[in-house]
Amino acid sequence: MAQDEGDTPELRGLAQRHYAHSFRLAAEAGDPELSATALRGLAVQCVDLGYRAEAVQLGETCVEYGRWAHESGMLLSRLGDLDAAEEHLHLALDIHGLDRRRTRPIVLAGLGGVRLRQGDADGAMATWRDFLDCADGIRSVKVQAALQDMRVRLRRYSGVPEAQELRERAARVAGRGQPR
């Protein structure tokens, strides 16, 4: 959760240490979903810091631990494999654990982004509508980032009434979920 508090070098370092510790504990406990979650966090940090080879290696391990999990789908999306990412994210919505209040909207936001990158604007908007339903009132840097990302991506559809409605609604949801 240190990563949800902001994006400073100190918080990134703290998150990295927690991800590594979480992975060791989850692997020791035999929990593949939590193992994959920790590996995904480390892999995303590697991508953000420019360590692509390390991110790929962590991503491959993440997929091994978290078959059809949210973490695998998000990492595949970051690495550009959109078809596989969409498949993993769809399956992630159907498997255990995704009724958690914070996780479901993040999966939906990711799926909407994947659909838009695939050229399916209608599918992206429908998915983002579901995302906004789930995200309302959640205090999380990740949800806030997903809201901002969605709003930016929808700017190029300024002539589409549904896109404008989603952007306005996202602004309202973002205002209610600001971390304090």
Image: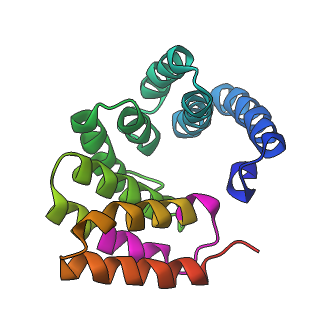
Residue 54 visible: yes
Residue 83 left/right relative to 149: left
Q: Could you tell me what secondary structure mostly forms the magenta stretch?
A: helix
Q: Looking at the image, which residue is at 54% across and 60% down?
A: 145
Q: Is residue 175 above or below residue 15?
A: below
Is-magenta flag for residue 90? Answer: no
Q: Is residue 72 above or below residue 6?
A: above
Q: Report the front residue among 65 and 70.
A: 70
Number of labelled discs? 0
Q: Is residue 15 above or below residue 180?
A: above
Residue 154 falls in image quadrant? bottom left
Q: Looking at the image, which residue is at 39% across and 59% down?
A: 109
Residue 73 left/right relative to 38: left
Q: Which residues are magenta?
A: 128-143
State the image coordinates of residue 143 (x, y, percent, origin top left): 54, 63
Q: Is residue 147 above or below residue 98?
A: below
Residue 79 left/right relative to 47: left
State the image coordinates of residue 68 (x, y, percent, origin top left): 35, 38
In which quadrant is the C terminus drawn? bottom right
State the image coordinates of residue 178 (x, y, percent, origin top left): 65, 75
Q: Looking at the image, which residue is at 58% across and 20% down?
A: 51
State the image coordinates of residue 91 (x, y, percent, origin top left): 29, 47
Residue 99 visible: no
Q: Looking at the image, which residue is at 33% across and 78% down?
A: 166
